[in-house]
Each structure stands twice: as structure tokens, then as C-alpha cells.
Image: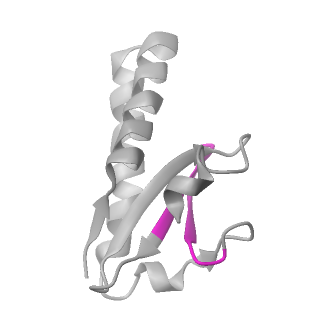
């Protein structure tokens, strides 16, 4: 099992990091990127995998990973090979992924 980023999710991560660079500087942006990646990488471990995550209330076929101490949720979907795709990262104030149609 592996976790990989969709292009759409990776673009969302780039947007998040770009926002932090403008608003708080490079050091904060890099720290945020590391925290998001670290949190997601924890779910590549045998004892802690995406199956242990809660299903999204709005999109029950997706798992939602709340990024600890940050206002973001990563949405994951299991592919046909048993790997997990990060389909988007969303600010919690948005409540929904940017484009629900791209997640189906």
C-alpha cells in the first residue's frame, strides 16, 4: 500500500504553500509543507493506514484526514490496486473539496 498525490491535490498543496509564503514568509511556508507531508506520511505505516480514518460525511466513499494543528483536511480515495490517492487538500472553512466532480 502506498499513498500518492493526484495532480489536483498537489496543485492545492502548491496554492497553500504559496499563500503562506506571501502572508508569513518562506520559513513558515516550508514548515507548513513539512507538517502536512509528515501527517500524511504517518498513514503509510502498517499500524496506521487510511482505513483507520473516518469517512467523509459529505463524500462517504472518501476518507478524510484532518491535518493536526492546521486548518486543512486531506481527502483520500482507495484505488483499484489498494493504494490511496490524495484527491484534494481543503481549508476547513470551505467544507467541500474545490470541485466535487473531479473526485468522482
Task: Inspect the magenta stretch and tell me whether residue 70 lies in it.
Answer: yes
Question: How many marks are shown on the rendered structure?
Answer: 0
Q: Nearer the viewer, residue 89 or 68?
A: 89
Magenta extent? 60-76
In the image, taking residue 69 as reference, residue 36 lies left or right, namely left
x and y, in percent, of residue 9 in the image: 41, 48
Q: Is residue 81 magenta?
A: no
Up-down relation of residue 22 to residue 83 (above or below):
above
Vertical arrangement, residue 93 with respect to residue 51, above or below: above
Task: List x then y, in percent, for residue 84.
Answer: 36, 73
Q: Does 49 sit above or below residue 65?
A: below
**Residue depicted at x 42% and y 25%:** 28
Picture colour scheme:
one colour
Query: Vertically, is 71 above or below 79?
Result: above
Return the x and y of residue 57 as percentages of the image width and height. Answer: 74, 71
Where the N terminus falls, by quadrant? Answer: bottom left
Residue at point 30%, 87% (across, down): 46
Name the residue located 73 percent from the left edge and 49 percent from the top edge: 95
Query: Foreground: 7 or 74?
Result: 7
Which residue is located at x 66 percent, y 77 percent?
Answer: 60
Taking the image as shown, residue 65 lies to the left or right of residue 25, namely right
Amino acid at each position: 500500500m502506498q499513498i500518492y498525490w493526484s495532480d489536483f491535490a498537489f496543485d492545492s498543496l502548491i496554492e497553500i504553500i504559496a499563500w503562506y509564503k506571501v502572508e508569513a514568509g518562506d520559513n513558515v511556508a516550508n514548515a507548513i509543507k513539512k507538517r502536512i507531508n509528515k501527517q500524511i506520511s504517518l498513514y503509510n505505516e502498517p499500524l496506521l493506514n487510511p482505513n483507520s480514518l473516518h469517512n467523509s460525511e459529505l463524500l462517504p466513499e472518501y476518507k478524510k484526514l484532518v491535518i493536526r494543528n492546521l486548518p486543512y483536511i486531506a481527502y483520500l480515495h482507495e484505488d483499484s490496486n489498494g493504494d490511496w490517492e490524495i484527491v484534494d487538500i481543503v481549508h476547513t472553512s470551505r467544507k467541500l473539496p474545490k470541485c466535487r466532480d473531479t473526485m468522482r
